[in-house]
Amino acid sequence: MGATDVVAQFVTSVKTQDLPQEALRRARTALLDCVGCAIAGAKYSSSGLLLDFIRDCGGAPQATVVGTNLRTSAPDAALANGMLSSALLYEDTCLIMPGHATATLLPVLLALGETRHLSGQALLEAYIVGFELEAALGPAIGPDHYERGWHATATVGTMGATAAACRLLGLDAERVRMALGIATSLAAGSRQNFGAMMQAFHSGVAARNGITAALLAQRGFTADPAILESRMGFCNLYGIGTAKLDAAMATLGRDFALLGPNLYLKLYPCGFPLQRPIDCALELATAHDLKADDIEEIRCGVHYLIPETVFHVNPQTGLQGRTSIPYCVARAIIDRRMGLAQFTDAKVQDPAVRALMARVKTVVPAELSREALRGKVNAIAAPAVMEVVLRDGRTLNTRVEQFRGAGERPLSDLEVVTKFRECAGMVLDAPRVERVLDMITHLDALGDAAELAVLLAA
């Protein structure tokens, strides 16, 4: 049985009773977190540009765009909700994808769940199906895929979104294979666009691709039926071969990646690689009561891929600040916190933070170099080290192996709920925030996802 067949069988055959209760619990947590991010994302300026574009294009009012009064076609709703989910760079990350799994899957669940009046349990099953495929395909084509500049959220995310859509539509194995073939020709996304509006757009593109591929396959549209393993198929096209594909498929549906330390939630609304440096900066600033004028230089040591992932060394906007080590480290030391309020254009242009940014140096220690780590340690899993040289001659050091929110150091239920309330409260009134919280917390008891969609509309 080829890899594409394995995936098709997994999508169509996995049973509710096959899914561990802990996986279902983690799925609910991820969806709650991402829904909050999407609602808050509706207030972001780049989201407004996309929403205006979708309104101008028109479309059958099939599905809701969260946090707005807009209803549009299911594919376009998925496009919008994906971008909203990632607009603040506050959404979760799948360690081994590596990318933003839930931001590519939630929009598919919302759009098809609403239009097909599906149960909450069906949404949870589809989420796990999509997550597990993304977690399997990421290692099959990595690390070369990421190092060459592909954004796995857009590429691998397209495949996971397609699997989730196929599950929700109840497609048979033959049509799942066709959908995966269609999806492979749709998948694309460049990391060069990090720090620009296009970075968040990638999540929406993946979600829209997934729904489009599944709906076309449902109608009989054809594509290569063995796309994962074919000579010019997914792994050969986006990776450097199929050598790791069989191993990736061997555990699909058996060892659930969602049960491992692979789902990382964020406390800080910025790029994933910045979470550890911020923790370093906050730890030193708090422990030693650091002031900007005390500091001669800050050296932030990271994995060799990090400087080319969050590469804005001289950010000019709040959006660029979300992908900037110098800004995030300097702002964390000055403000002693990193929330939504820290990522405005005005904050980035603040003279005090710009003066300290100039003294922040990003370095790659020997232990985190390409020679030491290539193919061994994912950039997402690598520690951050920080050395602060003070003007009084002292040197302070710290090291963060796992940031708060990492799979090995998960956020508490209270932290997840607090973040959700803060984000959702930017658009929805308090009673509705609590109703959405309760509905997602008990998602397996929801009979019709359209009821959730009503609550998520502005």
Image (cartoon, rainbow, N blue to C red):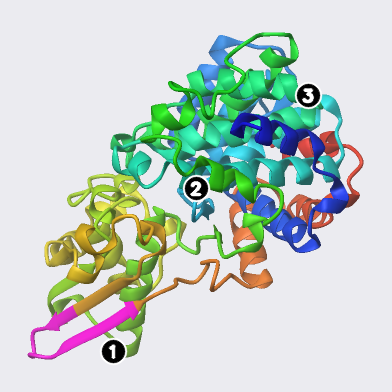
x, y (%) of residue 97?
Answer: 49, 47
Q: Residue at x 24, y 64 (%)?
A: 372
Front position among marks 3 and 1: 3
Q: Quadrant of the N terminus?
A: top right
* The image quarter in which residue 334 lies: bottom left
Q: Main secondary structure of the magenta part?
A: strand
Compared with 258, 389 (above or below) is: below
For this rendering, which residue is in front, 272 or 8? 8
Q: Is residue 67 visible?
A: no
x, y (%) of residue 66?
Answer: 66, 36
Q: Earlier in the sequence, mark 2 or mark 1?
A: 2
Compared with 98, 51 (above or below) is: above
What segment is highlighted magenta in the picture? 388-399
Q: How many marks?
A: 3
Real-space Cα separation, disc 2 to disc 1, in angstroms: 37 Å
Q: Earlier in the sequence, mark 3 or mark 2?
A: 2
Q: Is residue 454 left or right of residue 178?
A: right
Determine contact: label 2, label 1, CB under 8 Å: no
Q: Which residue is mark 2?
A: 97
Compared with 10, 52 (above or below) is: above
Q: Which residue is mark 3?
A: 171
Q: Residue at x 87, y 39 (%)?
A: 119
x, y (%) of residue 240?
Answer: 36, 35
Q: Which residue is mark 1?
A: 288
Helix, strand or loop for disc 1? helix
